[in-house]
């Protein structure tokens, strides 16, 4: 394995972007270290795709800088571009070509191309010779998505950006994809940024998580730590302290009952837990997602 | 309002205004333009005859209203109606299918009546009926119907050329026309029943094919032939595949980038049409040689102007498609921008501009040569050939105006969700790039100006040839000027891929 | 001395327990139950990651924790093996495994506002029934 610098692979500083009058990214800061596998979470329409497109320099930002491999993303060198793999959200790309033609085309665009890997993936993921000669627009959504993924992996990238790559795959397809990710991508030390709604996939594979809310990275950290430390404290509304608790993410009143979500159970929570009528429960990732992005 | 009328209003609303928010504007603007045109005709008529010739004006009015109804019916209503008639709706929504069929048939009858009345002779009723039907189906994206339309329009002179004059006269005569007029009603009934099936396995397939076809047509992705299975491939697609393979081997960055636009924007897409044109040219020449009829030659000569004129418009459309396509394949462009071969973003625009220009020129040259060859085959008149050449150059100038520019700009090109070319003109008013109202107007006015000057020169000097040569010179100068201007704009603009930044 | 495969483990996503903790718990239970004998070879990190489609770092974290606790030991050349000192160990150690379940029961007891004696009596009854 070649020596990796310890400087962040992806560095976004104070990135701001508007769509008309709406602010989609608001002074967003984000750093991704080499070898990290980060899951990007957020509600529909929160701007995950926009964030990834800005990250790759496909959209201009009004303010802030984005650096990939230490280079400004608007003027990436050819070497840097050869190290990036991108699976866009829209899977039905180049639909007028057949898979064979599409792979030949991309092979000509990249200096390094792992033909053996492409062949292996195509045969393992159910693409026989007949299907490879059929136009992509005739394939199903799942098959198109799998082609998209193979295309991104084919040139052995060091940075892999995946924008909802498995939305059209059934559970078997998803498991195959995760296995491929674990066996060949993560083992090589590739940095992976993964935007998806399928939390079970993220729990398995993403070691870090980032929640996008209101144009910023609202919460970021190791998956295990986030899930383990987060707590929901339910109590009668009368016992609700006025000041926010340490590590509080949000609070919610529903008639006579109040609930507070904390990132970490501090001393105040321990104290509250001993009081009558107070429940402290751990949260699953799904509950955490719902609470953080509400 | 009676329940039936309410149904009709409901369906009308759903198929037109609720499907496309701009359809109201479109209908109003079209009506305005036609009324303006009518007013101009009235004024000209008064000026010329110093009196209003009511019958003629009535016919013009009928024709114009027929035109308005026809455009609205065919481009807005019929596609919407076809969409509404999905398998589930046909079976489960109680009266919808019946009402749709009634409205379509009613519109069809009305249009046939209006056009026949406007022409003043009821003999053309069957042809008009067929034409209206074909037009509606074309607007819904069915490629085959387009050929029906072209056939209808060119039928008279084609019949005369290819059939012995006795049979041609018979077919165009009273008895045949009467029979066809009578047959029109059952044909109409059959046509409407065919357009709106009532559930079943075949309905599902047809409906989804129709929806894809319409969506592709509305996005202007061209009319790729339907492939039932993967062994029957469109011939031009094979040509495209070969071109793609060759470019993959040479790895020329400019050409590889252009492949992002797909086969529609590639010159190979025009090979079938060119081939058809040449075949028709050869066919007509052979038929004329066999028949050896001087009178016929004149007829054909006249008709060829119209036929080839259509092809000249096609040259404009062809180049328009290239720049149109840029705005549609944006996700593909994003992927390509990230590849190493695409090179530095600073040089991306230069590469693209060079390639766009090359492709545009090749396409234009191909079509011009085809038109000249076909024209030479049909009639050996040098004057006519010069005319065709002049029109080709003019069309080339119009096409080149929209070729280059700032594709990245957000306020620029808006892909037409139009069902007809008219909509293209009604899109956004920004004049950056792309075929919108302002660019269309400018192109049209410039062409008109040059045409006027050439015509003037021709009339003054007495020799039409000078006029046409001058037109060619002006068109070339105009093209060069426009291209230099837009070239500079494009090179100064941010990277063109992905065009319009995904919006 | 048996070599175990990754089929030893099963994980559930969507629970409040992170995956590495589930792996740790399972190893502890298997050792306490005697299914993992001292000296047995554990499947490698790669093997488990591949079989369960998990990030290898998660598996490493679990193994690291178990190594620190002394349940597993790292042998050069063999990878991870079950440590000699572990095994169906002292009752006190095994009792620790019951802690999470008892903590949950204690929380419920507090919600139901039961006093400790009632709860302990109930537990004793249940244990007698279970014999």
Image (cartoon, rainbow, N blue to C red):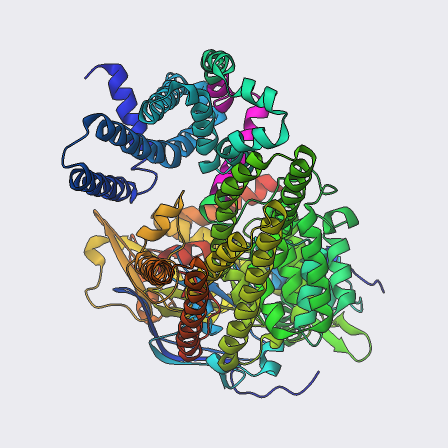
- Residue C2 image position (x, y, % from top left): 84, 62
Could you say which quadrant of the image residue C66 lies in?
bottom right
Left or right: residue A205 versus residue B192 is right
Q: As rendered, which of B417 and A84 lies closer to the eye?
A: B417
**Range shown magenta:** B190-216
- Whether B27 is among the magenta residues is no
Kindly give the residue lying farthest to the right in the view shown.
Answer: C1
**Residue drawn at point x = 73 percent, y = 66 percent:** B246
**Residue drawn at point x = 35 percent, y = 46 percent:** B422
**Residue drawn at point x = 68 percent, y = 65 percent:** A105
Left or right: residue B144 versus residue B427 is right
Q: As rendered, which of C44 and B187 lies closer to the eye?
A: B187
Is residue B34 in view from this perspective?
A: yes
Q: As rendered, which of A180 and B352 lies closer to the eye?
A: B352
- Magenta residues: mostly which secondary structure? helix
Is the residue B501 above or below the residue C8 in the image?
A: below
Is the residue B296 above or below the residue A108 in the image?
A: above
Could you say which quadrant of the image residue B408 lies in?
bottom left
Q: Quadrant of the C terminus of chain B?
A: bottom left
Left or right: residue A170 versus residue B448 is right
Q: Quadrant of the N terminus of chain B?
A: top left
- Whether B212 is among the magenta residues is yes
- Residue B389 image position (x, y, % from top left): 51, 58
- Residue A6 image position (x, y, % from top left): 56, 87
Left or right: residue B90 versus residue B440 is right
Q: As rendered, which of B135 and C95 lies closer to the eye?
A: B135
Is the residue A107 above or below the residue B142 in the image?
A: below
Could you say which quadrant of the image residue B300 lies in?
top right
């Amino acid at each position: 394995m070649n020596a990796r610098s310890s400087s962040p692979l992806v560095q976004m500083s104070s990135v701001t972007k508007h769509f008309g009058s709406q602010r989609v990214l608001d002074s967003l800061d984000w750093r991704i270290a080499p070898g990290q596998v980060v899951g990007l979470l957020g509600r529909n329409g929160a701007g995950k795709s926009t964030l990834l497109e800005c990250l790759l320099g496909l959209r201009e930002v009004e303010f802030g800088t984005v650096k990939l491999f230490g280079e400004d993303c608007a003027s990436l060198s050819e070497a840097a571009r050869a190290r990036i793999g991108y699976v866009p959200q829209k899977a039905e790309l180049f639909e007028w070509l057949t898979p064979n033609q599409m792979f030949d085309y991309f092979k000509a665009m990249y200096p390094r191309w792992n033909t053996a890997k492409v062949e292996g993936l195509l045969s393992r993921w159910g693409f026989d010779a007949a299907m490879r000669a059929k136009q992509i627009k005739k394939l199903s959504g799942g098959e198109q998505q799998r082609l998209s993924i193979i295309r991104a992996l084919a040139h052995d990238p060091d940075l892999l950006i995946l924008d909802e790559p498995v939305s059209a795959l059934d559970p078997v397809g998803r498991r195959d994809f995760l296995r491929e990710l674990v066996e060949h991508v993560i083992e090589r030390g590739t940095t992976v940024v993964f935007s998806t709604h399928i939390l079970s996939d993220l729990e398995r594979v993403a070691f870090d998580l980032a929640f996008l809310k209101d144009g910023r990275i609202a919460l970021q950290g190791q998956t295990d730590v986030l899930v383990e430390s987060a707590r929901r404290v339910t109590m009668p509304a009368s016992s609700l302290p006025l000041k926010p608790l340490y590590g509080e993410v949000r609070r919610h009143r529903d008639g006579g009952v109040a609930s507070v979500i904390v990132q970490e159970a501090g001393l105040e929570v321990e104290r509250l837990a001993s009081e009558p009528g107070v429940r402290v429960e751990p949260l699953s990732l799904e509950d955490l997602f719902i609470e953080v992005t509400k | 309002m009676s329940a039936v009328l309410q149904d009709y209003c409901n369906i009308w609303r759903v198929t037109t205004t609720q499907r496309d928010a701009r359809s109201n504007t479109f209908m109003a603007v079209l009506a305005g333009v036609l009324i303006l045109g009518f007013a101009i005709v009235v004024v000209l008529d008064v000026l010329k005859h110093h009196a209003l010739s009511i019958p003629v004006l009535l016919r013009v009015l009928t024709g114009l209203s027929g035109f308005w109804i026809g455009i609205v019916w065919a481009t807005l209503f019929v596609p919407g109606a076809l969409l509404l008639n999905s398998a589930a709706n046909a079976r489960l929504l109680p009266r919808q299918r019946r009402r749709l069929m009634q409205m379509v048939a009613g519109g069809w009858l009305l249009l046939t009546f209006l056009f026949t009345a406007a022409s003043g002779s009821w003999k053309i009723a069957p042809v008009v009926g067929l034409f209206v039907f074909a037009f509606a189906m074309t607007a819904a994206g069915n490629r085959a119907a387009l050929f029906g339309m072209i056939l209808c329009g060119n039928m008279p002179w084609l019949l005369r050329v290819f059939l012995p004059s006795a049979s041609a006269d018979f077919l165009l005569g009273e008895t045949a026309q009467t029979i066809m007029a009578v047959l029109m009603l059952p044909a109409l009934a059959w046509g409407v029943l065919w357009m709106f099936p009532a559930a079943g396995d075949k309905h599902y397939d047809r409906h989804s094919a129709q929806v894809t076809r319409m969506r592709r047509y509305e996005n202007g992705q061209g009319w790729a032939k339907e492939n039932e299975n993967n062994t029957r491939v469109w011939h031009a697609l094979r040509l495209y595949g070969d071109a793609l393979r060759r470019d993959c081997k040479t790895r020329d960055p400019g050409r590889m980038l252009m492949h992002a636009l797909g086969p529609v924007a590639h010159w190979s897409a025009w090979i079938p049409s060119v081939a058809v044109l040449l075949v028709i040219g050869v066919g007509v020449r052979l038929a004329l040689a066999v028949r050896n009829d001087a009178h016929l030659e004149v007829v054909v000569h006249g008709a060829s102007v119209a036929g080839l004129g259509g092809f000249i418009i096609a040259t404009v459309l062809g180049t328009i498609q290239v720049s149109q396509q840029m705005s549609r394949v944006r996700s593909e462009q994003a992927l390509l921008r990230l590849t190493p071969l695409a090179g530095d973003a600073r040089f991306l625009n230069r590469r693209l501009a060079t390639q766009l220009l090359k492709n545009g020129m090749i396409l234009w040259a191909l079509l011009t040569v085809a038109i000249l060859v076909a024209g030479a085959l049909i009639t050996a008149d040098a004057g006519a050939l010069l005319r065709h050449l002049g029109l080709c150059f003019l069309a080339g100038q119009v096409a080149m105006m929209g070729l280059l520019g700032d594709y990245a700009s957000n306020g620029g090109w808006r892909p037409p969700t139009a069902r007809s070319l008219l909509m293209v003109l009604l899109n956004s008013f920004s004049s950056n790039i792309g075929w919108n109202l302002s660019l269309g107007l400018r192109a049209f006015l410039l062409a008109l100006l040059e045409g006027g000057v050439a015509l003037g020169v021709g009339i003054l000097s007495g020799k039409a040839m000078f006029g046409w040569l001058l037109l060619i010179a002006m068109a070339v100068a105009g093209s060069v000027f426009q291209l230099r201007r837009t070239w500079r704009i494009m090179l100064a603009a941010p990277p063109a891929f992905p065009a319009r930044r995904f919006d | 001395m048996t070599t175990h495969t990754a089929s030893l483990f099963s994980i559930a996503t969507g629970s409040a327990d992170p995956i590495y903790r589930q792996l740790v718990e399972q190893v502890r239970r298997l050792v306490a139950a005697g299914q993992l004998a001292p000296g047995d070879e554990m499947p490698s990190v790669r093997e488990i990651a591949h079989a369960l489609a998990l990030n290898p770092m998660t598996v490493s974290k679990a193994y690291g924790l178990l190594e620190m606790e002394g349940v597993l030991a790292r042998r050069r050349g063999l990878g991870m093996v079950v440590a000699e000192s572990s095994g169906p160990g002292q009752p006190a150690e095994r009792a620790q495994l019951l802690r999470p379940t008892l903590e949950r029961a204690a929380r419920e007891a507090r919600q139901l506002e039961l006093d400790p004696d009632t709860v302990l009596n109930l537990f004793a009854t249940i244990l007698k029934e279970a014999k």
